[in-house]
């Protein structure tokens, strides 16, 4: 997961003072064009925020949820509870490219 300052510190060695509450974004998150994410928001792994959506302060978007609108609201889950659990447990985003390429069929199934 990244916060606005953690990647700057890792890449550039800069430690910046946070302004407002941090924004936390999990792995494999999709954020549509023009979306606005306000301070204090947490977006879980695999979640989707629709284009033009406004996610207001203090919202926690759980893994693999889809949120849209102004203000953004949850419209659905991307996957069943069982599939979400399996994806999170797999931690596939930590695996190397060679291993992922060797398991291509896993990524092409409509639902696990």
Image (cartoon, rainbow, N blue to C red):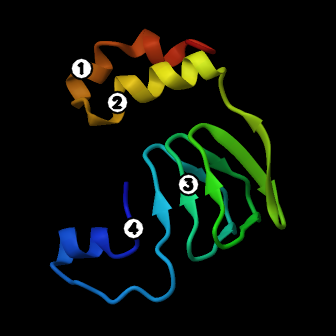
Is 54 on the left or on the right of 110, as rendered? right
Q: Circle 4 is placed at which residue position?
A: 3
Query: What separation in Å lies between label 3 and label 1 (alpha carbons)?
Result: 27 Å
Q: Which residue is mark 3?
A: 43
Label 2, on which residue? Answer: 91
Considering every residue shown, the one lying at the far left of the view is: 13
The kind of secondary structure element at disc 3 is strand
73 sits to left or right of 10: right
Q: On the rendered structure, is 55 left or right of 45?
A: right
In the rendered image, the vertical position of residue 104 relative to residue 97, given as above or below = above
Q: Indicate the secondary structure of the residue bearing disc 4.
A: loop
- Earlier residue among tags 3 and 2: 3
Question: Are dots 4 and 1 in contact, CB under 8 Å?
Answer: no
Earlier along the polypeptide chain: callout 2 or callout 4?
4
Q: Quadrant of residue 78?
A: top right
Disc 2: CA contacts within 10 A as few (<14), some (14-19) or many (>=20): few
What's the CA distance linking mark 2 and mark 4? 19 Å
Q: Dot 4: few (<14), some (14–19), or many (≥20) neighbours within 10 Å? A: some
- Residue 99: numbered disc: 1
Residue 86 placement (x, y as % from top left): 47, 19
- Measure how far apart labels 3 and 4 are at the Cα level: 11 Å
Q: Quadrant of the N terminus?
A: bottom left
Q: Where does the image place residue 95, in percent across and percent down from the top left?
A: 25, 29
């Amino acid at each position: 997961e990244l916060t606005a300052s953690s990647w700057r510190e890792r890449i550039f060695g800069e430690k910046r003072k946070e302004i407002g509450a941090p924004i936390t974004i999990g792995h494999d998150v999709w954020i549509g064009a023009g979306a606005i994410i306000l301070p204090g928001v947490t977006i879980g792994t695999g979640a989707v925020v629709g284009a033009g959506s406004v996610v207001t302060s203090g919202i926690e978007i759980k893994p693999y949820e889809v949120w849209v609108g102004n203000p953004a609201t949850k419209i659905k889950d991307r996957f069943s509870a069982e599939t979400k659990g399996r994806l999170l447990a797999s931690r596939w985003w930590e695996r190397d490219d060679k291993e992922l390429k060797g398991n291509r069929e896993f990524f092409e199934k409509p639902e696990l």
